[in-house]
Amino acid sequence: MSAFSNPFNPGVRLGAGCDCGRHASQAEHDLAIADEPRSGDIETLNRRAIESAVIRALFPRDEARRRFLHAVGSSAAMAAVSSFFPFGALEAMAQDKATPEKKDLKIGFIAITCASPLIMADPLGFYREQGLSVQLMKTAGWALIRDKMLNKEHDASHFLSPMPLAISLGTGSAAQPMRVATIQNINGQAITLHVKHKDKRDPRQWKGFKFAVPFDYSMHNFLLRYYVAEHGIDPDADIQIRVVPPPEMVANLRAGNIDGFLGPDPFNQRAVYDEVGFIHILSKDIWNGHPCCAFGVPEAMIKEAPNTFAALYRAVLTAARMARDPKHRALIAQVIAPPNYLNQPVTVIEQVLTGKFADGLGNVRNVPDRADFDPFPWHSMAVWILTQMKRWGYLKEDVDYRKIAEQVFLVTDARKYMAQIEMKAPAASYAKFKVMGKEFDASAPEKYLASFAIRKAS
């Protein structure tokens, strides 16, 4: 094959090193093709940008990426990525989106697996595909997350599902209308005990125990209270419950400052990995399908920057759709493990997300739905949370459960944006479910509340 002068790189003869003649070798060509969008129509540019982001997320180290592309070639690499990645849906959204009013956003998050969709949307390019430049702000604890939202330091945030309800009602903070756009995760928590308590598997033996939860207004607090109360333990009289930021839970367990915690992963699994704790019960075995964390925005964003809100919504939903598919969980563990995100061993995160895990009691368990990422913000979930806030004295006044649930949990918006990315949303927003075998009917919250023998005195 004859060689001609290469106008893109005069130092390289056309045809001398690669198929296109722009690069010194075929390996350099493959790397460039994978790392840089090519010129052409907008569809091609969109596809190349997404492909590049995915390859970089899979192989964040340049040398590892070069070795991979050199071994398989860019075409084979992209074909493999395309087999599991929703390029078509992303491209369709890219062609049908309005320009965001505000492109540069700060989003707060706590470094836990509950935030997987929100986190993975960054390295996998979902925010960028929606025209957004997002800075994920790793935050130390939930009180700080709340305060930064109230002070408008963050534009949107990873929340515990009860937090937007509490903030909107002015419970525990100044009142400000917050909205739940999506549930970030369902299940995915556990009660973990110190290894010295392996002989105390019956909660009736826990009188005098010290437990940690990540925040007062958390599913962790309400599920722990529910669980011990069903075993005859008064959570306000018989045990101590203290707030400990999730990243500090394992250290406090190791030091003996607490006997256990109902906390988010990966810290339950990290306690097992570090041989200081064992998993007593998964939260899914208390209430299978319970909400945990949410993706929340101030009501002002919806009104003042609707295009930004829509773009953000689509990005997070796209990530949730990918996270729901079990075949992607090992990849997601790799993507969210680095120091700027969870800063945890991939093995620990993968055990959580795949549901194949050591429990600290000598067993390897296989529970595929240990964690899941159904984004639909059920109104009935919000009503249950409100009953527990009232049960334990966090909510003093009578409330219109249905009105608050429907104001804060954005079901109509969820259906709209889920349809845009071909995710099926439920037809109803209220559903009955069981918590420890007891059915909850959102149409009769006061009757449900009155049925509990153990509750905080009015």
Image (cartoon, rainbow, N blue to C red):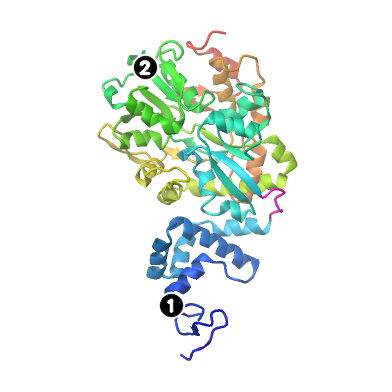
Is residue 190 among the parts visible in the rendering?
Answer: no
In the image, taking residue 196 as reference, residue 309 lies left or right, namely right
User: Vertical placement of 303 versus 285: above or below?
Assistant: below
Q: How far apart are marks 2 and 1 (CA)?
A: 65 Å
The magenta stretch is 97-103
**In the orientation shown, which residue stands out farthest toward the right?**
304
Magenta stretch: helix, strand or loop mostly: loop
For the residue pair 154 and 349, the one nearer the viewer reads as 154
Tell me, for residue 384, which label it has, or none.
Answer: none
For the residue pair 341 and 330, the one nearer the viewer reads as 341
For the residue pair 185 and 430, the one nearer the viewer reads as 185
Q: Callout 1 environment at 10 Å: few (<14), some (14 to 19), or many (20+)?
A: some
User: Can you tell which of label 2 and label 1 is closer to the viewer?
Assistant: 1
In the rendered image, residue 104, in percent from the top left (x then y), is placed at 65, 48
**In the orientation shown, which residue stands out farthest toward the bottom?**
2
**Residue found at x 56% / y 62%:** 49
**Residue found at x 48% / y 10%:** 453
In the rendered image, residue 293, in percent from the top left (x then y), is placed at 53, 34
Q: In which quarter of the image is residue 50?
A: bottom right
Write down the residue under mark 1: 25
**Residue found at x 68% / y 28%:** 176
Q: In which quarter of the image is residue 414?
A: top right
Tell me the kind of residue under disc 1: Ser
In the rendered image, residue 254, in percent from the top left (x then y), is placed at 33, 28
Secondary structure state at the residue bearing disc 1: loop
**Residue found at x 39% / y 61%:** 64
User: Vertical placement of 266 versus 121: above or below?
Assistant: above
For the residue pair 188 and 334, the one nearer the viewer reads as 334
Is residue 438 among the parts visible in the rendering?
Answer: yes
Write down the residue under mark 2: 209
